[in-house]
Image (cartoon, rainbow, N blue to C red):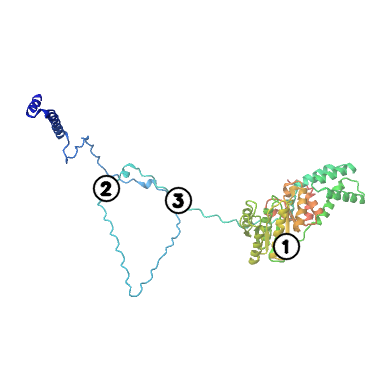
Amino acid sequence: MEEIFSYLNSMLPSPYSDLVTVAAIFAVLLVVAFIISFFFERKPGKPPQPEPRAPEAPEPEIKAVPPPDLEVFKAPPHEVIREPETVSVKREAPPAPGVKRAAEPAPLPEPTPLPEERQETIATPAEQEITPEPAAPAPAPEPEPEPEPGPVEEVPETKEGLFARLRKGLSKTHTGFLGKLGEVISNREINDDLWDEFEETLIMADLGMGTTMKLKERVQSRLKKKSLSDSGAITEALKEEILAILKSAEAKPLSISEKPFVIMIAGVNGVGKTTTIGKLANRFKKDNRQVMVAAGDTFRAAATEQLEVWSKRVGSDFIKGHSGADPSSVAFDAVKAASARGTDILIIDTAGRLHTKGNLMDEIKKMKRVISREMESAPHETFLVLDATTGQNAVQQAKMFNDALGVTGIVLTKLDGTAKGGVIIAIADELNIPVRFIGIGEALGDLREFNADDFVEALFYEGGETVH
């Protein structure tokens, strides 16, 4: 290289010798770089060679899987009732004259089936890996809905059977009232102490203070007139005086002279209004009357549904409004519907309310006014349902409802579940309201027309048989 430089320096003038030397070195380096890039750069147009891969394993031979035997998985045969399908046929209108009908499209050619050998050799991966599951049994036919309960038929009872049921229903009152009275007057001399205990016994039986004092005075007067000094005569005298009071409360049979004959049912919550309405409807249905029940209690939860069940049970018509509707509007619609259908008796339920709430009592007054506006003489009867277990509170309820509505009849329920049945004597004595019905049990026939003679005989019954 030094020899080349020295040769170049000798060939060129001295002022340019250094410049030429640098240019020569640059040219040499350029040539070397060109040679290196020529040999090591990939040639264009030639794709890169792929990296060598390991040889793949041969694919396994695919064999056809025979179809499984599904007979073992089939459900036992059963009859399936299919409803007939309704096929709607669309008829085309005939073409107008001079108009050609459009040609119908040609049917698509059916696919050519594959040869059997080809079908056997083709198998999807699902057929190779998935084992067929057993076929699900066909759904069983739905059971037919049960028919709605019809009117309940009861076996008619004899007079002896009715009296036995009445004695059984009054057994608790008999034990609580006459049992204690017997302990007071048995084998004792009639004196002031005996009369004090006699008075206490009547008050404890919920006869009330006024009725107790009246009975005490009348019994004393009766014994004095007959000059009786035997304490055993007190029971007989008391029986006659109670019968006289209850006789004044006996109601005359209902005179159903108009159509519809409207009966309005009132009472506080829990006294048994719904059950009483059902039993009343059953009694009227047995007399071959056409009955309609109106659900005027639109506030209490499930009140309408319970009354509807009773109506279906006894076979009466039923009318209701939507939940929370104005009870007066339900009563108005019921009177119109009963008149249009020719119904004999319409029983209208009302919402249970406390007799001490003035605003609630005003609402039931409005309901009665609406009924009277639609039918001049209606309601023909207004029954007040009282719970015998409430004792003297029942008397206060009767007074308040009578002032608001003019109650025409009392229905005293649950006499079979209390020893306070003596409240009926207080009601008959203090209120000038007839007692229409008494409830002595849960059965449909346990709502009885009140009969003073039968009631007193059952209450004072001293036969050998003990009724519980």
Q: Which mark is residue 309?
A: none
Question: What is the distance, in whole Å, between disc 2 and disc 3 at their CAs?
Answer: 34 Å
Q: Earlier in the sequence, mark 2 or mark 3?
A: 2
Q: Dot 3 surroundings within 10 Å: few (below 14), some, or many (20 or more)?
A: few
Q: CA distance from mark 1 to mark 3?
A: 57 Å
Whether the residues at callouts 2 and 1 have beta carbons within 8 Å, the answer is no
**Image quarter hosting the N terminus:** top left
> What residue do we see at 51% from left, 53% from top?
143
For residue 125, say whether it is visible: yes
Near-viewer residue (204 or 71): 204
Crowding at mark 2 (Cα within 10 Å: few <14, some 14-19, many 20+): few
Label 2: element kind: helix
Q: Amino acid at mark 1?
A: His
> Is the Cβ of the residue at disc 1 closer than 8 Å to that at disc 3?
no
The numbered dot on residue 380 is 1
Q: Residue furthest front?
A: 15
Which quadrant of the view contains residue 452? Answer: bottom right
Mark 1 vs mark 3: in front: 1
In the image, is residue 129 above or below residue 366?
A: above
Task: Tally the numbered discs.
Answer: 3
Which residue is labeled 2 in the image? 120
Question: Residue at position x 89%, y 49% from top?
Answer: 220
For disc 3, the marked residue is 139
Residue 465 in view (yes/no):
no
- Secondary structure beneath dot 3 equals loop
The percent position of residue 146, horizontal first and vertical second, equals 55, 54
Which label sits in the foreground, 2 or 1?
1
Q: Residues within 10 Å of mark 1 (few under 14, many from 20)?
A: many
